[in-house]
């Protein structure tokens, strides 16, 4: 017994000594680590580490780094109360967003700050000079909706409804308006919160965001609406700032299911609603889900998805349907946390039989608000086997959304782009990219007036065979807006090619 006691005691001391050596070794490594190594370790643990050149020194020192420090427990987290309510602050603290105890040694944090301060430019890097805008021979005519009741733009959704020969317009005033193709309002309904997405099939489905501005509160809902009874039936409630939904039969049971992108704030998720059982399931947890592209990616007869995430971890994720509500995931493209990703479009841009990805980035409303040289429209060529390579970039400050279609009906894909955060000496809030025979693009603003275009849709609602464009204006405040017509709500760019 005595020998056993001595042996066990000795064993404990050896283990303690080894742990002590490991601790000393780790501390020694950290002490010798450079600011870049520490940035890779701490910044890269959550998302791609942003390079110092992406932002000027002042933005790093006064915007990005102070916020990152608070998220690592460095600094007085109570300063966050200057920009949010006590409830939201409490919610974020409970989630561990702003920890009370530091997660990094003070000396290591100083090294990270020094790394970004010493290696960042004094002023923002210049934007690559874009190809000049040109006049393009086109067949578009423009129609406007001006609101006598709103002094500035409040549009949150524009949607062509070909089956109804209508245009549906959601707004910040919790209204959904219905216009005919002559832009005459037919009627409108009240909604629980701003409508951001809608579809009309066997029923009318409406998606209400809950709160337009960042919050952890879950006030959004998806419901079907009965026009005859003038009321709605909740399908999903307590959604976290949902921004888009898509309907498809994911489990091949002949009932259409619904997948919802909950953008959220610091948290968010992808929710699947079973169209037969009514069961709700969370299939992915990540904030920033912006839009969903439905495709049978592996041609196995089950509907898959590409989803763009645009908050923190900015990436395109592939969701492969495994059946029974299960999906495997794979990151296809990944970007810096200050990239400002804002929309994903998937189209075959070069007629090689493979669908390419168009990424629009220009979100400029977080902790690094300045003109970013890397904002604009990017085309990533599909090289097969899930590999994509950037082959086209057109710089546009504040670019928001790009949609591709053969607008001029010459057999190749053109593009229409809006830029909600447009800025610079010659701000471009709308651009039309006409593809040429050699695969290049000519860009034109079509002579349209500047506006804060937040939303856009394309389609053929008048069934004349060509593709029209519709834009929605939304102004955060009248003072900050450059919109030429302050009460401009919607602009229809009607294609008269046919």
Image: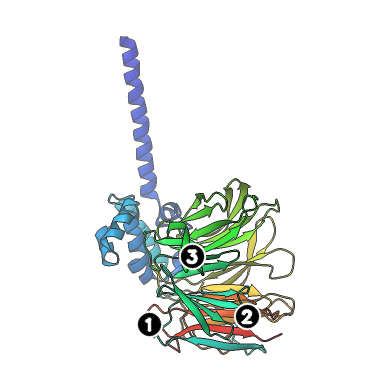
Q: Residue 209 lies in what quarter of the image?
A: bottom left
Front-most of 382 and 293?
Answer: 293
Secondary structure beneath dot 1 equals loop
Q: Which residue is mark 2?
A: 468
Q: Residue 387: give x, y in percent of width and height.
A: 65, 58
* View extreme (front): residue: 229
Q: Answer with left or right where residue 198 lies relative to residue 299.
A: left
CA distance for labels 2 and 1: 30 Å
Q: Nearer the viewer, mark 2 or mark 1?
A: 2
Q: Which residue is mark 3?
A: 207
| Residue at left offset 66%, top offset 65% | 356
| Residue at left offset 35%, top offset 43% | 27
Q: Nearer the viewer, mark 3 or mark 2?
A: 3
| Residue at left offset 67%, top offset 79% | 407
Q: Is residue 235 visible?
A: yes
Front-most of 112 and 461?
Answer: 461
Q: Would you say the residues marked 3 and 2 are in contact, meaning their CB atoms lie under 8 Å apart?
A: no
Q: Which residue is mark 1?
A: 480
* 3 or 2: tag closer to the N-terminus: 3
Q: Mark 2: give few (<14), some (14-19) or many (20+) Cα within 10 Å.
A: many
Q: Residue 248: give x, y in percent of width and height.
A: 61, 58
- 196 w.r.t. 100: above or below: below
Q: Answer with left or right where residue 390 lies relative to residue 57.
A: right
Secondary structure beneath dot 3 equals strand
* 1 or 3: tag closer to the N-terminus: 3
* 2 or 1: tag closer to the N-terminus: 2
């Amino acid at each position: 017994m005595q020998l056993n006691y001595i042996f066990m005691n000795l064993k404990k001391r050896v283990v303690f000594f080894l742990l002590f050596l490991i601790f000393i070794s780790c501390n020694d490594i950290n002490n010798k680590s450079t600011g870049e190594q520490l940035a890779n370790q701490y910044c890269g643990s959550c998302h791609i580490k942003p390079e110092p050149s992406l932002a000027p020194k002042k933005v790093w020192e006064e915007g990005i780094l102070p916020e990152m420090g608070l998220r690592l427990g460095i600094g007085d987290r109570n300063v966050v109360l200057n920009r949010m309510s006590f409830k939201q602050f409490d919610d974020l603290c409970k989630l561990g967003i702003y920890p009370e105890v530091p997660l990094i040694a003070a000396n290591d944090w100083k090294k990270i700050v020094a790394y970004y301060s010493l290696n960042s430019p004094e002023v923002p890097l210049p934007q690559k000079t874009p190809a000049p805008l040109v006049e393009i021979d086109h067949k578009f005519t423009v129609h406007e909706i001006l609101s006598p009741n709103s002094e500035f733009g409040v549009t949150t959704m524009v949607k062509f409804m070909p089956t109804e020969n209508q245009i549906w317009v959601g707004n910040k005033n919790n209204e959904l308006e219905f216009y005919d193709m002559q832009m005459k309002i037919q009627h409108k309904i009240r909604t629980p919160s701003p409508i951001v997405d809608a579809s009309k099939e066997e029923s009318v489905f409406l998606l209400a965001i809950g709160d337009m501005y960042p919050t952890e509160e879950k006030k959004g809902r998806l419901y079907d609406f009965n026009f005859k009874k003038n009321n709605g039936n909740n399908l999903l409630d307590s959604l976290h700032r949902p921004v888009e939904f898509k309907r498809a039969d994911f489990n091949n049971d002949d009932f259409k299911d619904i997948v919802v992108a909950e953008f959220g704030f610091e948290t968010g998720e992808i929710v699947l609603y079973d169209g037969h059982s009514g069961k709700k399931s969370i299939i992915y947890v990540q904030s920033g889900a912006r839009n969903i592209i439905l495709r049978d990616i592996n041609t196995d007869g089950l509907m898959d998805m590409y989803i763009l995430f645009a908050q923190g971890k900015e990436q395109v994720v592939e969701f492969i349907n495994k059946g029974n509500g299960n999906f495997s995931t794979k990151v296809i493209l990944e970007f810096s946390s200050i990239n400002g990703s804002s929309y994903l479009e998937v189209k075959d841009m070069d007629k090689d039989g493979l669908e390419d990805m168009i990424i629009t980035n220009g979100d400029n409303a977080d902790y690094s608000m300045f003109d970013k040289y890397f904002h604009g429209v990017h085309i990533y060529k599909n090289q097969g086997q899930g590999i994509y390579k950037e082959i086209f970039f057109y710089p546009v400050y504040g670019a928001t959304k790009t949609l591709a279609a053969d607008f001029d009906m010459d057999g190749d894909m053109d593009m229409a782009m809006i830029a909600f955060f447009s800025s610079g000496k010659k701000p471009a809030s709308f651009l039309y990219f006409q593809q040429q025979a050699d695969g290049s693009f000519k860009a034109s603003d079509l002579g349209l007036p500047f506006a804060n275009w937040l939303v856009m849709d394309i389609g053929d609602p008048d069934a004349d065979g060509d593709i029209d464009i519709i834009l929605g204006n939304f102004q955060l405040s009248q003072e900050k807006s450059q919109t030429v017509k302050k009460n401009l709500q919607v602009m229809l760019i009607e294609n008269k090619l046919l």
